[in-house]
């Protein structure tokens, strides 16, 4: 009797609705992509400046976000020291905002850590 009851129940008698093959989009994917893009731009611009310590920090941060570094053949205009400070401050603000708005707690902690790491760099500490 149990087998009959199970086989007789069909929630979709026509079979018209096929299961969705596309997974639901990750609500934080746009944040991750923006964060990776921000770090790639910083790595490119700072590489042209010769700020090797900052480049190393941003490469490690990009790796934490599972991002690929920009190609080494890409050439960018070097940043002045003042432009470097402005770019780094803007990046720290963006990472802080992204950390506050993302839904995934682990991702929020990584983004907040990146913001703190940027703020701890000597180039920004010297401006206080």
Image: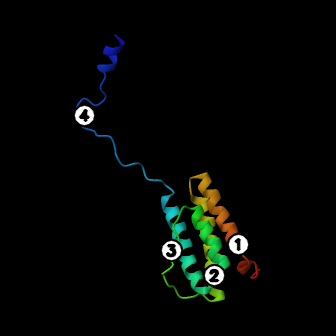
Earlier in the chain: of badge 3 and badge 4, it is 4
Earlier in the chain: of badge 4 and badge 1, it is 4
Q: Residues within 10 Å of mark 4 (few under 14, many from 20)?
A: few
Q: Residues within 10 Å of mark 3 (few under 14, many from 20)?
A: some
Depth order, front residue of 40/84: 40
Is 80 placed left or right of 77 in the picture? right
Decide: is 5 above or below 17: above
- Residue at the outermost top position: 1
Earlier in the chain: of badge 4 and badge 2, it is 4
Earlier in the chain: of badge 2 and badge 3, it is 3
Q: Nearer the viewer, mark 3 or mark 1?
A: 3
Q: Which residue is mark 1?
A: 119
Image quarter where the N terminus lies is top left
Per the model, the C-alpha gap separating discs 2 and 1 is 12 Å
Residue 85 picture location, percent across and down: 66, 82
Earlier in the chain: of badge 2 and badge 1, it is 2
Per the model, the C-alpha gap separating discs 4 and 1 is 57 Å
Per the model, the C-alpha gap separating discs 3 and 1 is 22 Å
Q: Residues within 10 Å of mark 1 (few under 14, many from 20)?
A: some
Residue at x 24% of width, y 37% of height: 16
Q: Which residue is mark 3?
A: 70
Per the model, the C-alpha gap separating discs 2 and 3 is 21 Å
Count all numbered tags in the image, as a single digit: 4
Q: Which mark is residue 15?
A: 4
Residue 114 picture location, percent across and down: 65, 66
Depth order, front residue of 68/121: 68
Residue 97 picture location, percent across and down: 60, 65
Per the model, the C-alpha gap separating discs 4 and 2 is 59 Å
Q: Which residue is mark 2?
A: 86
């Amino acid at each position: 009797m149990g087998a009959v009851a199970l086989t007789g129940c069909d929630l979709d008698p026509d079979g018209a609705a096929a299961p969705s093959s596309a997974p639901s989009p990750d609500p934080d994917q746009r944040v991750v992509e923006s964060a990776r893009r921000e770090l790639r731009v910083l790595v490119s611009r700072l590489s042209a400046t010769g700020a090797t310590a900052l480049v190393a920090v941003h490469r490690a941060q990009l790796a934490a976000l599972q991002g690929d570094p920009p190609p080494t053949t890409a050439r960018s205009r070097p940043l002045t020291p003042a432009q470097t400070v402005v770019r780094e401050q803007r990046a720290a603000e963006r990472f802080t905002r992204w950390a506050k708005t993302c839904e995934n707690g682990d991702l929020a902690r990584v983004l907040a850590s990146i913001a703190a790491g940027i703020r701890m760099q000597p180039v920004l500490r010297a401006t206080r």
